[in-house]
Image (cartoon, rainbow, N blue to C red):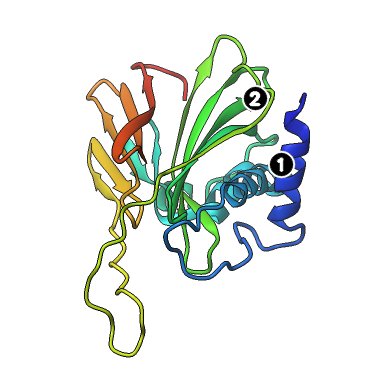
Amino acid sequence: MKRLRPVLALALLAAGHGAPAGAEPPRGRAGPGTANPSALIAAEIAFARAAHEKGQWTAFRDFADQEAVMFVPQPIMAKAWLKGRKDPPSSIQWQPYQVWISCDGTLGVTKGAWQRPDGAVGYFTTIWRQQKDGGYRWVLDQGNALTSPLKEPDMLSASVADCPARREGPLRAGSGRQKQPAREKLRVAGADGGGRSDDGTLTWTYHVAADNARTLSVSLRKDGAMAQVLSVSVAAGASR
């Protein structure tokens, strides 16, 4: 895999062999400047490894956030769809190529290539939300088949959002810290949904049309403003 191999190898070590499925080492409270792209890469690699070792849908269940969404092809709560689903004889394989992550590390996006046992190829996009223990679970998974493999980069790319300006506000008595905002629930309302990082520096939205065509957009804070960094469209009748 060209020069990508050493990068993935380091992330694989960070994932921790023998760790529980979906688990990452606790890293403490999220906050400005705590984004760690390698932890997100490690989560994606651990997810792919679990699919190979334990079964495709078993891995999807183990790594899913409670609010995770899938397209089948309309949006559906993943936990309900995956419950009791039998694993295929051979799992799909995938590799991350690009990463985007919020300044505070509470939300991130990975994009890469997948290969099915039947020879089909395509791309995937996974959105990850940080958990209370500092690990990551996926909140949205989508992708599509391609006529030729996604071009493999020489090096995996990672982009971290600019941190927002520090806001002064009331402190909790005796804490010396600003009160942490309540985590926003994912917006899943039929054909439309989305979410944002706790600090608002990474946002995502999707729309699914009546004919099952869909779009997904991701924006990242750069140079003092939100800028779209990823936009994908899947035509009606696509295979995935």
Q: Type of residue at label 1?
A: His
Q: Helix or strand or loop: what does disc 2 sit on?
A: strand
Picture coordinates of residue 27, whole percent (x, y): 57, 67
Q: Quadrant of residue 74?
A: top left
Quarter holding the N terminus is top right
Picture coordinates of residue 235, whole percent (x, y): 35, 16
Q: Which residue is mark 1?
A: 52
Q: Type of residue at label 2?
A: Gln
- Which disc, if any, is residue 115? 2
Picture coordinates of residue 34, whole percent (x, y): 50, 58
The answer to which of marks 1 and 2 sits earlier in the sequence is 1
Residue depicted at x 40% and y 52%: 80
Say which of 238 and 186 sits in front: 186
Q: Quadrant of residue 178?
A: bottom left
Say which of 141 and 41 sits in front: 41
Picture coordinates of residue 225, whole percent (x, y): 28, 38
Residue depicted at x 53% and y 64%: 134
